[in-house]
Image: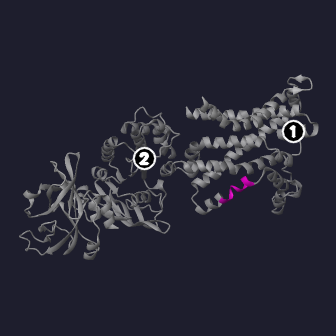
Amino acid sequence: MPQRLLALLFVLPALAVIVLLFMVPLGASLIGAFESGEGYGIANFIKVFELYRWDVLFTVMVVLLSTLLIGFFSTAIAGYLTLGENPRAVAVLRWLYRWPMFVPFIVVGQVLRTFLAKNGLMNNIFIELGLMTPISATSFLDWRGIVIAFVWKQVPFVALLVAGAMASIDRGTIEAARNLGASRLRILVEIVVPQIATTLMVGLVLSFVTMMSVLSVPLMINAQSPTMLTADIAFRINSYGDYGVANALGFVSLLITAGAAWIYLRHSVKERA
Amino acid sequence: MGEAFLKLEQLTVGYGANTVLHSIDLAIRKGEFVALLGSSGCGKTTLLRAIAGFVPPSGGRVAVSGREVTQLPPDKRGMALVFQSYALWPHMTVAQNIGYGLKLKRRPKSEIAARVAEMENLLGLQGLGARKPGQLSGGQRQRVALGRALAIDPEILLLDEPLSNLDARIRLTVRHEIRALQRRLGITAIHVTHDREEAMVMADRIVILKDGHIAQQGTPEEIYNRPASSFVAAFLGAENRLLLQAERLPGGSGGGIGEAVRIAASPVSAEALLPLAGRDLQSGPVEARFRAEAAELLPAQAGTAPVDGALTLSGHVTAVSYPGGQWRHGVKVGEADIQVDAPAAFAVGDAVTVRIKSGDLFLYPTEGGASRLAAMPPEGVGKRSAEVVEA
């Protein structure tokens, strides 16, 4: 089988990269999660539960809420791009909505930190407009800030995917509904979204996983407790050199993202059946 | 013709600087089945979409039983459109597809279910209500699309090439099904198609469109036997084309046949005297069109003598084929290639005489006159040739 061997040889470099740069470190940190001063065991996970259980909950809630809002806003934007009847408004929106995609998370964090702070731009505008008094101004630099940052950054990405999917569905299905008297909102909810649900789901799962791994935004916006797991992992490593607990925290994040992936896979299997 | 139910006045539609429909005037009676016939790009689908309200006209008006609907949205016009792609909603069942229009009208569930069952019975979709469109055959999908349109009880049914995605055999049955259904419901229907036979079989009246204008309208029999222009003649199968010299004769001079036209003798055609029979002709070059099946093919020696009231041509056979029924012959007549059917086959190379009776011969003044006639290159037989002439 010289030809088969040759084929294997061609695949080998790619395989080696995946194994050496991805599988091995992942395996090492998975094993590391169960490794502590007293040998192998779940000591690290007990520590995670004692110290970080509220952070786990906080992370899941923030990312879930962000995912829901991303789904809502991206569907609204893509829906307007598909069904909008004012060509100028559609053109402007099409030009505008993608920009946040090109802004790095760290910059998003920086921008929103100055925008959302107690004396930040947002509150100043509200105060100038007479919508609130300086006393009642509060900082948004907590979970709300993280959600706003995530949504602002991820909506364009999902909207791009969803708008592409919406553009490729048969226009006739939209016109047939219009012909029967459906409003644009009904067409979006009852005709268009069901046809692109899989794409929306893919976009949301990808966003979910991305948000689970962002460190800069919680560090910049939410310098308090509870915070997100990424900030905790960085803290364990940088302040304590405690790789065991950091790995255990990583393992927990992996379980959460795996949960999202499982929901997606189950749905796509059901679609195909 | 009774009073118009659907009336188009000076309807003009354009995309940007490009005008697709040029002030179309059309009046359609209640219960009439009208086919919009034309080749692709002639504006027939745009006309249907403008009637339906999906394309805003740049001028003119659309009225339904005296009520102007030009500016109304598609759902306020009492019309339902059946799309070429059927455009069924893939995530809904057959019953949900059919019942959606009624759901939008907030009808009670029991009423919707009854109407859906009625439509399923009417269209032979019993037992398929729970299926998704992806699990249906092409013909079934087509009927679901029809059911969805008819469920809301529209006054006017618009059909955008609804048969073009079906197998040839199914298409023939569905033609009759749609026509029978339309008769039974007494609904006014406008059917867009590029298929001549489909239009002929289904419609009460055919409207032939060309480059955004109405080229001719009339009953199938009228447009088939009296095509108003060379384009219409070619579109309806009279694809054989010859250029001849004609002389118009006043009444009384044509051997007692009233006003007449004399076709001058040429190397390939004998002199012929034909009744004018309402043709719009002056003396000069004319374009002759006729169908392959309308001409008679004879051996050269037997048919040489010209016959009154018929055009006689001489040529030789260049090709023979058997498409079924009759033998089809390619015949070279001078510079022109024509096709002629005959019950028995001639051999390639045989000298033959082709005879076309006056009633089967369509004559039109050539547009460019004599100078253009001389410059015109010889053309093959086929659909294209008509378009070249018209261009």
The picture quadrant where one finds residue B24 is: bottom left
Query: Marks 2 and 1, Cα distance to the nearest angstrom?
Result: 60 Å
Give the residue displayed 81% in from the left and 49% down from the top.
Answer: A145
- Circle on res. A232: 1
Whole-percent x and y of residue A133? 86, 58
Q: Secondary structure at mark 1?
A: helix
Residue B316 within the segment the image draws in magenta: no
Whole-percent x and y of residue A166? 58, 49
Dominant secondary structure, magenta: helix
Give the residue displayed 24% in from the left and 60% down from the top.
Answer: B337
Residue found at the far right of this picture: A240
**The C terminus of chain B lies in quadrant:** bottom left
Q: Is residue B162 above or below residue B357?
A: above
Whole-percent x and y of residue B74? 47, 55
Whole-percent x and y of residue B177? 32, 43
| Three-letter code, disc 1 | Asp
Other residues around mark 1 within 10 Å, as few (<14) / some (14–19) / many (≥20) = many
> A181 or A82: nearer the eye?
A82
